[in-house]
């Protein structure tokens, strides 16, 4: 007891378990006599010996508790068990003085426990214990507390409602020992407590409860209290109902009900008239019953039933019934059951008396009678009484007839489901609580018909209560009645009989037609009863249907608040005895029904199973084939409930089975599992998934040679694997495919060489699954990767890395390990076909990788199949768009090449090299293939360098940067040095270049021209095949222009630079031809091509250095320069283009003056001084034009270079021509240059704000100033240059330009000083 109040939960639990050995705290002692409790007196002696003050108590409850409240609670409950145990074992003890003395001391201990400082739980437990003692020993308790009335009155205002109600009952019990006058005074005092205003709720509640119990006791006694007092009390109670809240009104009605149990309530006398209480309260009660306070409604409706127990007025009865029937549409179960109890009290014959209700811890009929869960006779034995209710039987016959008509004509067959539910609850209540009443006995067939009809209700509560009702009807009837009831049930459920009553809205109430069940998902709940009825008919024992329903429909439909449930042990025993001969037929269905979707059916069938089958494992083993046959058939049933139950049952039953038990059913189980996984009903699919997991576990165990004997494992594999590969993996249902592949992967781990017969199918299945089982979100992301900035190649690599970590790859590795020569005959053709037809990135990369691994495993064993694989793989590499897949297939092709024949290798490499002339995808395929050949089959590839090296070299210059980059990488990997490789394969490279230049493909021409440039750059003058290349190029220059043709000019330029000596020596006329060809190119209209032509012309002139080139080229350049003059804007850009000069083409036909000036610079560099002097005027015009403000600064920079080159040429030749006419002409040229160009240079420095221009112009000015010393004093003309230069120096910010300008000033000053001295 002390442990029950310990601070630790575990100690408290163990202590309580030691005190109360029964699992159910409410267990009846007589049912558990093995647990013997001590005698009450001995236990009290021991407790009081420890603490004698436990019997101390005071009027105001100011005593101190000696222990924690929880310890008191445990002690009181234990003492109460001792009291009940001792009293039940020997009922005569109630009259012995020793026992009564012990009870007296226990009452004192309980009074001590009611100390003010005690907990609510303690006070509630204590007060209920006192009422319990009073229910067994009313005289003793009554006399004991008759002297403690004031103590009880103080407790009526307790904060706990249960305590107040228990104390009120005690007050009622104690009042029976008081004189009538004292009781009357007590009633008046109680009435004054609740009739005043501004009272606490607790005070009013306690006073109302006590008034009911005390007045009820006084009314039942003779002589009774005065009529005036009774009238006053009733009026006060009625006033509370009328004026107070629903809660207090319900308590007041409860008090009126308790008074009504003891006698018929008199009419209220108002002035000269009288009116019955129910009539007076009718309107108010209607409002209260329609309110939201459910607890208040329950108390009120039960109170109405109590008030009518001894009522004799038909009008009052009618009012009461109308009030109760007004609740027929309530959806609150507790209210409906309360109304059912009220109707039972009105009907009569209930198994409780007024004393039971008033003087015990009574709560409701269902809890007190314990009808559903226990033995009703025993539960009521301690409340047995000889009291007979004397009421008007005629009045009650009318009432019963009214109730019957209301139930059977209006409610039970109503079109509203809530009314049918209310009718079912009330009919069940009448049948349970008034079942022994003769009227009920006569109505049993009609009641059975109503319950059987209600079994088909969709409302779960209605259906369950109807099934309970049928079991009760079966128990109540005699033998002949039971037979009639069984016949009526069979005809009702099967539809073979004719109904006695025309039932309204049958079509609306039932969800099946023509006796079939399960046409809709919601109608399945009838199937259970239909199946059971059919089974009973087939067995020829229709009376078994009741046994089934006693069990199958058993459940706790009435919870602890409103009742109990049937005593299952008795029903199971009766049904079990009758069913034993038929177990072989019943077991398959009983097994399945234990997995029914309806939890009620599951629980019911589980109880049946436990009751009828002593050894479940042995029973199932003996009937396993019958069970399998039934379940496999039901897995294909039209009823989803049957399909679901069968799948769940199979999932449980197959666990732990051996091959000889399930072998012949294995394939069928897999088949039904897959069907269930694709069922239209979600719950069936869930059951199918569970069955699939179970059969998967079983199959893996049966196929594992370490867990199953080898022959059985082999047979299991032969059954399951072909089925999974043919039916499961090829299924269109995603979940089935995934499940099948999962099983196959697990089977492969333990199968070993047993996989070889199925290897080709298994490998292809796994490869296809790499894509089919991939997360589809990755495909979506890849489609939109470009939009969100994700690189496709990186995403593909991510997908492949995920796939390589999947169980499918693990299975493929296992398959590789068991491959042998025989299995290749079937495997390789399947792989070759999958190469062509495989879908999905993972599958395509997977098959390529698998081929790679396979060849590494079998090595030369692949040679007989190499041609087949080469013919399959090569086209796929060309057509594949995915980079990752292309590389994978290239790798597979390379490893097959390594083991192929020489002729096959030659053809493959030549075909590969030919890809470089194709589109971009073909070129990428070419480089990937060559890379793979180089890394995997380098020994084979080395014999074909003359084929692939030229291809790699020329493809380095593809226009596509990605493609050219790939070939550049390959070139670096394949060669040790550019110069050596090019010299080694010069002939093949030149041949390929010439062929490409002569081709019709512009891309090939461009690529070849760039290759020639690279050859010229690397080999220089050692390029021996220059003539062939130059000839090919010169053939392509004439003719129409095409995109990129300027690369041919770049190639000619490169050859001219690198091989100009050899070209001149071999054919002296060839440089002139080249010059003429390039000069004609300079007249073309396309800007890019013309710029390239000018650049080429510059390099040709520089490279060959022929002085004659000046006279050949300069006139053309001069003419072009004149056409570009800003002063001649009215002229067409070119004389040859006079037919058309559209503004849109202005940019294309303009002459690049900067490049033109570069060409003039080259001409000046190679020209003779004589030619320069002769073209003095033209050169001055060129400088004047190019240095004019109309051109960009880049043109001026080119002009500065030309002027500097001219100054350099003139200065270097002046000393050689002293005294000759050429010297004079040269001097005049210099003077003209000084006077004409110098101002232009100064202007450029002044107007252009670019430091580069300032530096170049100042340097050019310095060159001219240095030539000024050659001008004679007679020819000198001051142009004011010195002053302008001084001003420039002052403004110039660039230090280099300023320094150069200062040098110019010095030269000019020296020149002027020299002229002054000469004069």
Image (tube, helix red, strand yellow):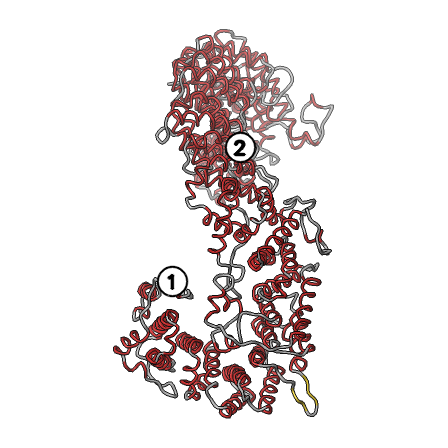
Up the image or down, 1304 lies above or below 98; here it is above
Percent of width and height locating residue 395: 67, 75
How far from the left and from the top, in percent, is residue 489? 63, 51
The circle drawn on residue 32 is: 1
Q: Nearer the viewer, residue 892 or 738?
A: 738
| Residue 852 image-quadrant placement | top left
Q: Nearer the viewer, mark 2 or mark 1?
A: 1
Q: Secondary structure at mark 2?
A: helix
Image coords of residue 1177 (percent x, y): 60, 24
Q: Residue at x 46, y 38 (%)?
A: 693
Q: In front here: 1068 or 375?
A: 375
- Per the model, the C-alpha gap separating discs 2 and 1 is 53 Å
Q: Quadrant of residue 70?
A: bottom left
Q: Mark 1, residues whose alpha carbon is within 10 Å: few (<14), some, or many (≥20)?
A: few
* SS class, disc 1: helix
Q: Is residue 125 left or right of residue 1158?
A: left
283 sits to left or right of 377: right
Q: Along the line of sight, which residue is nearer the eye, 510 or 782?
A: 510
Give percent across and percent down for residue 999. Answer: 58, 13
Residue at left offset 36%, top offset 75%: 93
Q: Quick check: can you spot residue 1275?
A: no
Residue 1226's disc number: none
* Upstream in sequence: badge 2 or badge 1: 1
Q: Which residue is mark 2?
A: 671
Looking at the image, which is closer to me, 860 or 570? Answer: 570
Q: Residue at x 60, y 57 (%)?
A: 466
Would you call the spot at circle 2 few (<14 residues within 10 Å), some (14-19), or many (20 or more)? some
Q: Quadrant of the N terminus?
A: bottom left
In the displayed structure, 30 sits above or below 205; it is above
Say if residue 543 shows up in the picture: yes
């Amino acid at each position: 007891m002390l442990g029950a109040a310990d601070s630790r939960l575990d100690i408290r639990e163990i202590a309580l378990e030691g005190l109360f050995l029964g699992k159910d705290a409410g267990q009846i002692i007589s049912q558990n006599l093995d647990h013997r409790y001590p005698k009450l007196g001995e236990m009290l002696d021991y407790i009081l010996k420890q603490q004698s003050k436990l019997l101390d108590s005071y009027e105001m409850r100011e005593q101190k508790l000696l222990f924690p409240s929880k310890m008191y609670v445990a002690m009181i409950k234990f003492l109460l068990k001792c009291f009940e145990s001792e009293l039940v074992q020997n009922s005569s003890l109630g009259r012995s003085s020793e026992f009564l003395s012990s009870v007296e001391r226990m009452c004192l201990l309980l009074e001590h426990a009611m100390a003010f400082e005690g907990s609510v739980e303690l006070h509630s437990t204590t007060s209920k214990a006192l009422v319990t003692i009073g229910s067994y020993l009313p005289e003793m308790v009554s006399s004991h507390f008759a002297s403690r009335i004031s103590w009880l009155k103080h407790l009526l205002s307790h904060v706990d409602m249960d305590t107040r109600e228990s104390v009120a009952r005690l007050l009622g019990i104690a009042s029976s020992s008081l004189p009538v006058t004292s009781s009357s005074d007590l009633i008046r005092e109680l009435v004054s407590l609740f009739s005043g205003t501004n009272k606490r709720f607790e005070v009013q509640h306690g006073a109302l409860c006590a008034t009911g119990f005390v007045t009820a006791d006084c009314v039942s006694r003779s002589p009774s209290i005065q009529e005036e007092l009774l009238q006053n009390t009733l009026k006060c109670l009625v006033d509370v109902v009328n004026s107070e809240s629903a809660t207090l009104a319900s308590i007041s009605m409860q008090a009126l009900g308790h008074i009504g149990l003891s006698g018929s309530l008199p009419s209220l006398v108002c002035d000269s008239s009288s009116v019955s209480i129910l009539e007076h309260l009718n309107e108010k009660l209607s409002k209260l019953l329609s309110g939201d306070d459910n607890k208040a409604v329950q108390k009120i409706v039960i109170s109405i039933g109590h008030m009518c127990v001894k009522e004799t007025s038909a009008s009052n009865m009618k009012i009461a019934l109308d009030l109760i029937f007004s609740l027929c549409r309530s959806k609150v179960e507790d209210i409906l059951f309360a109304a059912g109890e009220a109707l039972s009290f009105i009907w009569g014959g209930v198994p409780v008396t007024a004393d039971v209700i008033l003087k015990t811890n009574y709560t409701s009929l269902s809890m007190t009678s314990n009808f559903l869960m226990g033995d009703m006779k025993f539960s009521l034995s301690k409340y047995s009484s000889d009291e007979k209710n004397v009421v008007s039987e005629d009045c009650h016959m009318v009432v019963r007839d009214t109730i019957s008509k209301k139930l059977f004509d209006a409610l039970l067959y109503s079109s509203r489901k809530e009314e049918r539910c209310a009718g079912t609850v009330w009919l069940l209540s009448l049948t349970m609580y008034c079942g022994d009443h003769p009227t009920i006995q006569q109505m049993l067939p009609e009641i059975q018909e109503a319950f059987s009809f209600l079994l088909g209700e969709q409302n779960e509560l209605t259906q369950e209560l109807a099934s309970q009702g049928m079991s009760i009807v079966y128990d109540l009837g005699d033998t002949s009645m039971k037979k009639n009831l069984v016949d009526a049930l069979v005809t009702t459920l099967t539809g073979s009989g004719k109904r006695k009553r025309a039932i309204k809205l049958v079509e609306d109430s039932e969800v099946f037609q023509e006796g079939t069940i399960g046409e809709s998902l919601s109608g399945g709940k009838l199937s259970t009863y239909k199946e059971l009825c059919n089974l009973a008919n087939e067995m020829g024992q229709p009376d078994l249907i009741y046994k089934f329903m006693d069990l199958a429909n058993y459940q706790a439909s009435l919870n602890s608040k409103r009742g109990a449930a049937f005593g299952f042990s008795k029903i199971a025993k009766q049904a079990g005895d009758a069913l034993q001969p038929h177990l072989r037929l019943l077991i398959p269905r009983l097994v399945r029904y234990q997995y029914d979707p309806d939890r009620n059916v599951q629980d019911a069938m589980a109880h049946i199973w436990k009751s009828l089958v002593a050894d479940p494992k042995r029973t199932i083993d003996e009937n396993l084939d019958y069970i399998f046959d039934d379940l496999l058939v039901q897995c294909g049933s039209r009823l989803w409930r049957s399909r679901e139950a069968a799948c769940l049952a199979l999932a449980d039953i197959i666990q732990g089975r051996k091959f000889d038990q399930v072998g012949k059913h294995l394939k069928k189980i897999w088949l039904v599992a897959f069907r269930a996984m694709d069922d239209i009903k979600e719950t069936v699919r869930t059951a199918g998934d569970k069955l699939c997991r179970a059969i998967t576990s079983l199959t893996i165990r049966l196929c594992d040679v370490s867990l199953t004997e080898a022959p059985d494992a082999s047979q299991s594999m032969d059954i399951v694997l072909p089925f999974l590969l043919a039916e499961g993996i090829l299924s269109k249902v995603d979940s089935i495919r995934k499940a099948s592949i999962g099983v196959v992967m697990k089977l492969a781990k333990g199968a070993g060489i047993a996989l070889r017969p199925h290897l080709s199918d298994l490998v292809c299945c796994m490869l296809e699954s790499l894509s089919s089982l991939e997360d589809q979100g990755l495909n979506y992301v890849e489609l939109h990767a470009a939009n969100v900035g994700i690189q496709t190649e990186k995403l593909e690599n991510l997908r492949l890395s995920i796939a390589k970590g999947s169980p499918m790859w693990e299975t493929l590795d296992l398959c590789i390990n068991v491959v042998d020569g025989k299995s290749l005959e079937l495997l390789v053709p399947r792989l070759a076909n999958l190469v062509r037809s495989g879908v999905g990135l993972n599958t395509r990369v997977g098959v390529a990788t698998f081929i790679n691994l396979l060849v590494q495993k079998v090595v030369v064993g692949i040679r007989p199949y190499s041609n087949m694989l080469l013919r399959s793989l090569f086209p796929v590499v060309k057509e594949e768009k995915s980079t990752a897949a292309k590389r994978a297939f290239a790798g597979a092709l390379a490893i097959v090449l390594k083991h192929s024949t020489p002729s096959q290798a030659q053809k493959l490499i030549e075909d590969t090299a030919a890809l470089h002339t194709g589109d971009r995808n073909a070129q990428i395929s070419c480089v990937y293939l060559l890379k793979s050949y180089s890394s995997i089959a380098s020994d084979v590839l080395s014999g074909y360098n003359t084929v692939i090296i030229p291809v790699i070299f020329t493809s380095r210059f593809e226009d596509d940067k990605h493609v050219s980059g790939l070939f550049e990488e390959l070139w670096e990997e394949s060669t040790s040095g550019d110069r050596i490789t090019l010299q080694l394969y010069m002939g093949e490279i030149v041949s390929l270049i010439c062929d490409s230049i002569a081709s019709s493909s512009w891309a090939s021409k461009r690529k070849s021209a760039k290759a020639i440039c690279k050859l010229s750059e690397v080999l220089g003058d050692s390029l021996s095949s220059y003539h062939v290349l130059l000839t090919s190029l010169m053939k392509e220059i004439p003719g129409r222009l095409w995109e990129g043709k300027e690369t041919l000019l770049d190639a000619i330029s490169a050859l001219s630079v690198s091989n100009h000596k050899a070209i001149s020596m071999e054919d002296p006329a060839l440089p002139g031809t080249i010059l003429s060809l390039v000069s004609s190119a300079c007249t073309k209209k396309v800007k890019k091509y013309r710029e390239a032509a000018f650049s080429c012309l510059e390099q040709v002139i520089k490279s060959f250095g022929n002085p004659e080139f000046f006279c050949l080229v300069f006139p053309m350049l001069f003419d072009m320069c004149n056409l570009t003059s800003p002063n001649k804007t009215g002229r067409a850009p070119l004389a040859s283009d006079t037919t058309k000069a559209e503004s849109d083409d202005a940019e294309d036909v303009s002459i690049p003056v900067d490049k033109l000036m570069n060409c003039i610079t080259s001409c000046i560099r190679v020209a003779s001084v004589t030619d320069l002097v002769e073209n003095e005027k033209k050169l001055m015009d060129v400088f004047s034009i190019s240095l004019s403000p109309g051109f960009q600064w880049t043109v001026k920079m080119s002009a500065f270079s030309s002027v500097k080159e001219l100054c350099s040429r003139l200065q270097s030749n002046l000393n050689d021509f002293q005294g000759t006419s050429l010297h004079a002409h040269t001097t005049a040229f210099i003077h003209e240059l000084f006077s004409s160009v110098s101002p232009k240079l100064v202007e450029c420095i002044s107007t252009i704000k670019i430091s580069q221009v300032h530096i170049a112009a100042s340097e050019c000015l310095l060159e001219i100033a240095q030539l000024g010393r050659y001008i004679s004093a007679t020819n000198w003309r001051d142009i004011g240059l010195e002053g302008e230069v001084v001003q420039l120096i002052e403004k110039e910010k660039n230090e280099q330009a300023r320094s150069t300008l200062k040098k110019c000033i010095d030269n000019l000053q020296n020149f002027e000083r020299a002229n002054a001295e000469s004069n």
